[in-house]
Structures are given as C-alpha cells and as structure tokens.
Amino acid sequence: MAVVVNGVELSDADMEQELPLHADAPNPMQRAMTALVLRRVLLDEAGRLGLPSADEEAAINALLAAEVQVPTPDEDSCRRHYQQYPQRFTVGELVEVDHILFQVTPRVPLEALRGLGEQTLAELLADPTLFAERARTLSNCPSGEVGGNLGQLSRGDTVPEFERVVFAMSPGTILPRLLETRFGLHIVRVARRVEGRLLPYEQVADQIAAALHTASQDAAWRQYLQLLVGRARIEGITLEGADSPLVQ
C-alpha cells in the first residue's frame, strides 16, 4: 500500500535515497519510511507558515526554531545533575575484568545454555582458581584463550548492561549470578579496580548545561512532532510516536 501524507504519495526514489541511512536499524524499511513521513509533515508545516528557506534542511530548522521553545537549564538543575550522576564526570576509573561468555545462538536451547552457565558459576564460586581453565574450555569469547581476561576497562568500553554491573562490583569477587547482555550469558569476575577522580563542577558545568539543553530540545521536538502528526492526514503507515526519528 502506498504511503500518502496530506494527499501526496511518497516516491520510490525518496525511499531509495533514505533507506541507506537506516541500514543498521532493527527494521530499516520501517524506520526509513517513518523518517520520510515525518520529514514530509515538517516540510508541509514550514510551507503552510510561509517560512523562507534555501532548501529542505533549512526549512525544517527554521520551523523548529520558530515554533519550539527550549528552556535554558539553570544553575540549580546543572548542579543537581552533577550530584546525581558523579560517575559521568569521573576520570581515570578502571576495572580489570575476567569473564566467561555463553553465547546465545538459534542452535542452542536457552534453558540448556543457562543450565550450563549456572552449573559452571556454582563450581567457580566454590573454587575460583578454576576460572581461567573454565574460560579456556567453555567461553565463546576470544578472551577465553587468555583465561577470560578482558584487560582494563574504562567506562564506555563495553555495552551499558555489562558496564553497570562490573563497575559496581568489589575487586576480587565473582558476580553470584549470570549477567545477561545482548551477547549472551556471562560469568564475571573483577580482579582489580582503580578508583577515578571526580572532576570539579566548574570544569564540567558547560558540558552539563549543553547536555541538559539537548535533552530538553529532543523532548520538545518530539512533542511538537506528535502534535503535527496528529493534525496530518497520513495513510499507509502507523507511526511509532515519540520513538520515531525526527530529522535525518
């Protein structure tokens, strides 16, 4: 079924141009079409308001600047953010991590894999000296060849669900449960930890203000776009609402 926005059908040529921009998305076709629809909605509104522009990007930017008010974060908001998330402004923090990965694949039943992981974990909690040996024989990660050692990790080096756990662990401990990430099930040991240094607020105040402004801007743009989508006549697609891409 063709996708029509305010009486205008989106072209195949537009889709061919947009699709490569979403190649890494879970559903690239859906994401590309959604982006085209939202872009068309924005351009139609810019045209309705008679905003001057040299090209489509300029038209969208002019529309957002004219119609969306973004509050400037005040000093109190910035300081609260600094106090609530000190880990974001800490430098030099390191953990040395060993792990055993049980990779989830279509060929291996998840429950059987979990059973093997839990059995191995119980064995290692009882005798941690077996960790390197079990990593070499069981781990689906290349680090298994070196006993599961991932080396020294800084924040941002691993996926968030792994990072949150290992940076909260005490050195010399094995996590007493399997850690589940997008890669599979992990047995994790933190061998060593180096505490970082919290940067003074004055050094990161501008960075915090910029981040809070960007977050407020994104929220305001999503709300405005939802308003425009509600007014538009859209056929052939169901939009994802606030989670949809705004401007590519």
Image: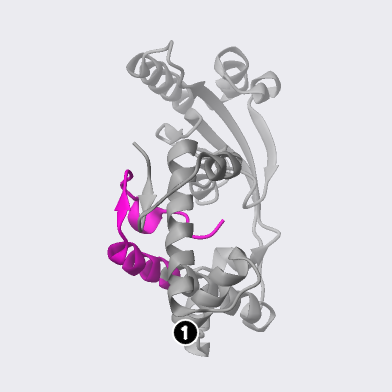
Near-viewer residue (153 or 16) = 16
Residue shown at 55%/15% (left/top)?
138
Near-viewer residue (83 or 73) = 73
Height in image: 119 above or below 221? above
Report whether 79 appears left or right of 199.
left
The image shows residue 167 at horizontal and vertical percentages of: 55, 50
State which region is magenta: 220-248
The local crowd at label 1, few if under 14, some if 14 to 19, many if 20 or more residues have their Cα within 10 Å, is few
The image shows residue 139 at horizontal and vertical percentages of: 57, 19
Q: In which quarter of the image is the C terminus?
A: bottom right
Which residue type carries mark 1?
Pro
Q: Which quarter of the figure has residue 30?
A: top left
Instruction: Look at the image and say whether residue 226 sits in the magenta stretch.
Output: yes
Instruction: Look at the image and say whether residue 202 sits in the magenta stretch.
Output: no
The image shows residue 84 at horizontal and vertical percentages of: 47, 72
**What residue sits right under mark 1 in the picture?**
71
